[in-house]
Image (cartoon, rainbow, N blue to C red):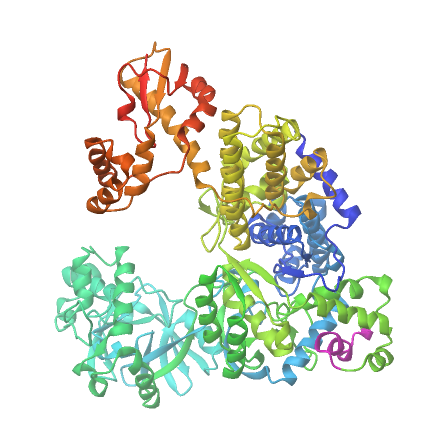
Amino acid sequence: MDFKAIEEKWQKRYDEAKVFEPVVEPGRPKYFITFPYPYMNGYFHIGRAFSGIRAEVMARYKLMQGFNVLFPFGFHCTGTPIVAAAERIAEGEKKQMDILRKMGIPEEEIPKFADPVYWTEFFPRETKKDLKRIGAAVDWSRSFITTSLNPPYDHFIQWQMRKLKAGGYIVMGEHPVVWCPRCKSPVGDHGRLEGEGVTPEEIYLIKFRVGDDAILPCGTYRPETTFGVTNLWLNPEVTYVRAKVNDEVWIVSEDTIGKLENQKFAVTILEKVPGKTFIGQKVLNQVTGTEIPILPATFVDPGVGTGVVMSVPAHAPYDYAALRDIENDPKKFGLDESVISGIKLVNLITIDGYGKFPAKEIVEGMNIKNQDDPKLEEATKEIYKKEFHTGILNENTGKYKGKKVMEAKMELVSDFVHADKADVFYELPEPVVCRDLTRCVVKIVSDQWFLNYSNPIWKAQAHKALDQMKLYPEKTRKQFDYVLDWLKDWACTREYGLGTELPWDKRWVVESLSDSTIYMAFYTIAKYLENPEYGIKPEQLTDEFFDFVFQNTGKVDEVSKHTGISKDLLNTCKQEFEYWYPFDLRNSGKDLVQNHLSFCIFNHTALFPEKYWPKGMSVNGFLQLDGQKMSTSKGNVHTLRHICDQYGADATRMTLMYGGEGLEDPNWDSEFARNAGPRLTQWYDFAIENYGKGRDDEKYIDRWLESMTIKTLKLTRESMDNMDFRSAIQRGYFDMQRYLKWYIRRSPVPNKKLISWFIEAETKILAPFCPHVCEEIWEKIGGQGFVAKAPYPSWDDSVPVDESIEKSEDFIRNVIEDIQEIVEVAQLKEAKEVFIYTADEWKYKALQLASGKNMGDAMKDVMADAEMRKQGKEVSKYVGKVISERLVFSGVDEKAVLDEAKDFVSREVGMTVTVNPETDPENKRRHAIPGRPALLIK
């Protein structure tokens, strides 16, 4: 089967008929679905494709349900990554040039990428090709790129920022941000190669005094443990710096100097000092007034904190294990035993399940060997979590005795800082790498513009919007609530990169997560602004224009006069927005809950009336490749074009959507993809061969297939409604095919009306997932128009649900299996005949009377029937069996079903079959009970 030819045929027809370019239809229900526009620094990879196709499948499904569906697609070019990559190409950097080569960019094309504008032209064009190749149901007439390179979008973002500032949502302030030293700008999640979601965290520099004039500042998240410090750790292999920091002399690692300067400390380097010179010296713990030694530790990372670490072995498993190693062999670490002889563990915190020294207990309990044991990480998490959430400070913490750790922390920090025994410092808990490959730091910026997400009134509005939204899956609501509460002010500008200039402060460019929060509204009018045929010039796109369209302010006559845009065109834009908005669904990866999706909620509540707030969001996991996490280092990040070339569009789509659902990380299964093409070919061949053919009479097996199909259609629609697409494929394709296989096995000549209905239903179910082959089938069987717009499969609700019809096939399967088992066990392979005896009629009646009752009530009801009393002792014996085995009446007309299916049973078992023969020479019938006929094999 030539899938490529079929794909090209239907993609061309989709374009020619403008199938996915909807127009406003007042009165017709609409469905507006969006997907975060991808960043244009590379080809579209299958990880992004998973999220994108999820949105697209939902769009196709809603179209088949009769909705007027809009699914547009844009291209994100804002930020520093494109500019940084272009600069590296211009500099001839081999690493960046190799990245383009690995993408498949021709050698002669690579120099063009030295111009950042070329990236914004090349990758949007190629991404559009890739999405068309996979059959994406996108309205391309509304497509656009971001940044000032697109003046209409540029004016839209300027309007957005002015509105936010006027409403008090943008403020200037001093905040710690993730900063790229090369870009000289804050780095949002979209601008990071590593460390997405990482934000600056507050730590505390506890000041230990060494000698007469110097401070050793130790970074810690747990200032309460200062009362239990037994020693400091320094790395003897690292060079430290003696520097004047503000009005004090500090000793810190060289890496710390830049971090201090970025956080507004005044720093002057005095001299460099080898770390080994400090080992064995005493320092003063200013909090407790005790002197403690400095001990060697090569595990101290000079890039973390200040390169100086305090040791609390009673409560820190790493510290206990390291101290134990030194105590076991001081000479190995170059120490005299006298240096450590006075060290004693100090208990500070009481927690349930542990004694005085929790770290010691867990290290010994987990049989941790030494300071390099990987089990220390697990031990540390266990102790830290328990102590922070449930720990009570004891008498060794002075005035803080009896307080919970989590409640005392801020009071304790305040006291330490005011007493000049500590400073506040910011650190990144995990490495963050900018897309220009630079390691990021924390910088405190004071003239930066921030979106004021910490504003409690704005947070309340965002929560109100979230409460009204439909979430897929619903379990993400807790995460959204947490993020809306947790979000702090967000740096919304940068000094470098592509984007929109901040209208009132042109030193700054709007950063990439702040110019992408309400652009779904721009989609509604994009074709009128982007297409020259409508004649709207960028300079006409004033705030008055956007206010009129998006906020229903101003009169059309005045707006037309001031902007020069015709009243008809103004009203058309306004009508488009008011028809399509709000968006009904936005689908994305789960990593965007903590930024983009939550920002989207905040910004909508600030700029639009409540009726235009988002109606729904969907979140999914991260795609794995054959069970492995996709990563550049593993070389297993595949582009959509590569996968389509290998497997074809429909097989790719089906494999992606069968990969997983909900928040679980989906998996691309290459074996499934290889088999998808043959499966679709098989379905195509069956559908074309059998549509409109078969017999006219109706059999039990026909009623069974109809019943199973209706039940499956209901389950499939339920899965589709919930965006559980893996379940939808499992039910709507694999289960349906299993039922079909049994049906054809039971009835090689199908019922014509039924099989035609089944073929239509199955093809429609598959259409959102595998549109090209389904369009081909639809055309071949005489379907009207495009299957993409055909009504989703329905069923006749007036057809009563008859469970006995479904049970009848289970009954036939069981009879066949019983016959085959007897033949095998009794070694009757030469048998020629099988006689099947169904139970006597009175047993069916007795079963109905006795089922579900205790013995006394059952016998009372059964023996009240004169017919039953004639059976004598057989009745009580049988009723006892019904009660003990909990038999239930199935409702199956066993004799009628067997009579109809006896030819099938005969084929399956390879013997002639006789149902209820007149003679019963071995008295087999008396053993038959409902559901278990007696068998005589000869």
Q: Is residue 60 magenta?
A: no
Q: Can you give x and y, in whole percent of width and height, for residue 733 in the image? A: 54, 39
In the image, 648 versus 849, the foreground residue is 849
Residue positioned most to the bottom = 418
- The mark total stands at 0
Q: Is residue 868 above or below residue 484?
A: above
Q: Is residue 751 left or right of residue 363?
A: right
Q: Is residue 584 above or below residue 161?
A: above
Q: Can you give x and y, in whole percent of width and height, for residue 901 in the image? A: 46, 24
In the image, 342 versus 488, the foreground residue is 488
Q: Is residue 842 above or below residue 434?
A: above
Q: Is residue 550 magenta?
A: yes
Q: Is residue 487 visible?
A: yes
Q: Quadrant of residue 31?
A: bottom right
Residue range corresponding to the magenta coloring: 539-553
Q: Is residue 786 above or below residue 401?
A: above
Q: Quadrant of residue 78?
A: bottom right
User: What kind of secondary structure does the magenta stretch mostly adopt?
Assistant: helix
